[in-house]
Image (spheres, rainbow, N blue to C red):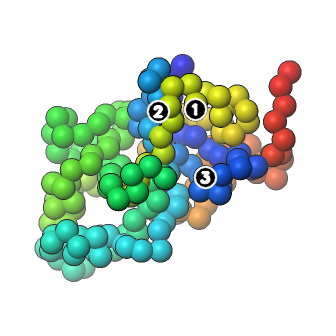
Amino acid sequence: MDLTGKLLIAMPGMGDPRFEHAVVAICAHSPEGAMGLIVNKPLPSPDLPELLQNLGITPANSDHAIHAPILFGGPVETGRGFVLHSPDWGTPEGQMRISDRLRMTGTRDILEDIAAGCGPDRALMALGYAGWGPGQLEAEILDNGWLTSEGDADLALDDEYATKWTRALAAIGVDPRTLSAAAGHA
C-alpha cells in the first residue's frame, strides 16, 4: 500500500509528544521507508520573515502575505527547510510531486519567489521532517499509532493549525472524543 499523498492523523496515546495531535502529509512512501511533513505545529520562532532575513532574502513588499509561521515538520534534520505547496509554481524538475494538488520543494529559489510575491498560490514552510525506516510506518499504523486519510491539499495547506487534527478526523467520520489510546486487534 503506497501512502504517498495521504494524511496521517496521530492517535491519542501515540507515546511520542512530538507527534501529539499531529497531522502529517506523506510526501514519499516506498519499501525503503517514508517521509512526511507535520502540517499543524507552528514553531514559536523563527517565523518566515526572520528566516528570509537570516538567508539574506529581502521581501519585495512588506505587505506581502509572508508573515506566516514556520512549522515543525518533524524531528529529522530540523535545520533543513521544506516548502509544501500548490502545483502552480516552478518547474517539475525542482519539486517533488506528492499528488495532483501538492508538491514539495527544498530549494532556496522557492523562498526567493515567495519573497518576491511570485511563489505558489498556497504554501507552508517547515523545518525538519518525519521519517520512517522500512516497515516502521506500517508497524506504527498496525499498533494504533496513526489513522490514515485521503490527501486533502486544502486542509494540508490552510493556516488553521489549531483545528487541523480535529478537522482531519472529522473528514474521515471520527469524533476525537470516541478515540481510545489502547490498541486492539481482532
* Residue 34 numbered tag: 2
Q: Is residue 148 left or right of residue 46?
A: right
Q: Residue at x 16, y 70 (%)?
A: 57
Q: Contact, CB < 8 Å: mark 3 with mark 2?
A: no
Kind of residue at badge 2: Ala
- Residue on which the image places disc 1: 137
| Image quadrant occupied by the N terminus | top right
For the residues labelled 1 and 3, the Cα–Cα distance comes to 13 Å
> How packed is label 3: few (under 14 Cα within 10 Å), some, or many (20 or more)?
many
Q: Position of residue 44 (x, y in %)?
A: 47, 74
Q: Amino acid at mark 3?
A: Phe
Q: Which residue is mark 3?
A: 19
Contact? badges 1 and 2 (CB < 8 Å) = yes
Front-most of 59 and 121?
Answer: 59
Disc 2 secondary structure class = strand
Badge 1 marks a residue whose secondary structure is: helix
